[in-house]
Image: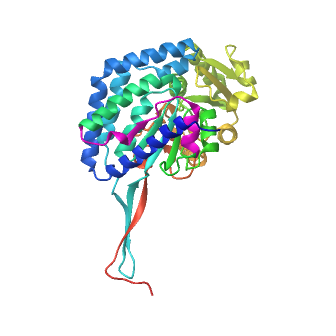
Amino acid sequence: MTTTPEIETLMLTCGRDARRAFQALGKFSSGARNGGLMAAADAIQNDQAQILEANAADLEAAREKGLSAAMLDRLALDADRLRGISDGLRSIAALPDTLGVVSDEWERPNGLLIQRVRVPLGVIGIIYESRPNVTVDAAGLCLKSGNAVILRGGSESLRSNRALHEAFVSGLESAGLPGGAVQLVPTTDREAVGFLLSSMGDYVDVIVPRGGRSLVERVKQDARVPVIGHLDGICHIYVHSQADQDKAVDIAVNAKMRRTGICGAAETILVDRQIADTALPAIVNALTEKDCEVRGDKDVCHRCPNAVPATDADWSTEYLDAIVSIRVVDGLDAAIEHIETYGSGHTESIVTEDQEAADRFLADVDSAIVLHNASTQFADGGEFGMGAEIGIATGRIHARGPVGAEQLTSYKYVVRGSGQIRP
């Protein structure tokens, strides 16, 4: 894809300004960065009216385009959500500082003292869709960890992102920090994304995509710098033969229906055959009462007339909607095999009172997050005590699971000697 001179100039300016601000951030203490985060939180609350007005315009345009209910939910802001966004910044500010932390040290026989010390990654490019809260979460986590950031949100949330970005930057600058540390790409032109991925290696150190499969696949294919991300959130609940069935119903309904449009929402429920006669109707009825469409295998449809037949494609589909697929499995081994075959390595949960079965599930299921007797909707950096996160990484390089402030750092080795030379 060719890039127009206007887009090239725009993106190179973002890159240069971000790199310059990153270098300046190194001069600020942890306390100063935390003060900037607190000031940004206050600014967002003070600018609530303007932010909600911008969000209302985004929502109106999104409805006219026919966006799904799940996408509209992701996009929507209100006073409570805005308060949660500000509180998230304050939570990030309260986290222990990760920069300069000595994670390990040892002394060599020759007297050299070697330390492994946490440092920022540099300039982080974040490409995301729909959710305007990502603008603030990502900016806050990057600032906390000493990084500068270039944010590129989706076209559907452009007005909201601009309003949030303006408030955040005004807060930073009021606290004496460089506002250029948080850049927002001011165009929805797809050329800007292409240029960010392919031609800004001199300014951008890592890319984090947060969005649907098509976005993440494009980023992984086109990026010329390292990528931290995941493709799908095909999350599973396995109801074991020794499950507390009331607990299983509550967990299944929450995991699917609390918020259907997040990557930690359960998309498939596996029920052990030994308890299928009682557990299946209870789970299916509870879900359909919440207006969730249930797509089941033949065993599910036989027991539950309110289920519709599932296709092969359902087991590998991230619905992000009030739809769930349910299958009957013959024990723990079959459940693990299903997850290995169709899962995306995101989040899986087992419901059981059998500790041995739970321990085996937690050990053998190779996903970024595994849970016992808990909803998959806890797959969230805020719920993990990280203040917030900019995504769930399902790869095995650098970061895995919720990507919070600590995961946005690397390390360097500091070696202290007293005149040693190598023979």
Per the image, is 171 magenta? no
* Residue 352 seen in render: no
* Residue 149 seen in render: yes
Q: Residue at x 55, y 50 (%)?
A: 226
What's the coloring here?
A: rainbow
Place of residue 237 in the rendered image (x, y in percent of width and height, measured from the top left): 58, 32
Q: Is residue 129 left or right of residue 110?
A: right
Q: Residue at x 30, y 38 (%)?
A: 37
Q: Residue furthest front?
A: 5
Where's the C terminus, which quadrant? Answer: bottom left
Observer-nearest residue: 205 or 92? 205
Observer-nearest residue: 307 or 279? 307
Magenta residue span: 175-198
Per the image, is 189 magenta? yes
Q: Quadrant of residue 367?
A: top right
Place of residue 165 in the rendered image (x, y in percent of width and height, measured from the top left): 38, 31
Where's the N terminus, which quadrant? Answer: top right
Place of residue 317 in the rendered image (x, y in percent of width and height, measured from the top left): 66, 29
Q: Is residue 48 above or below residue 202?
A: above
Q: Is residue 145 above or below residue 241?
A: below
Total numbered badges shown on the rendered structure:
0
Q: Residue at x 49, y 12 (%)?
A: 60
Q: Is residue 168 above or below residue 65?
A: below
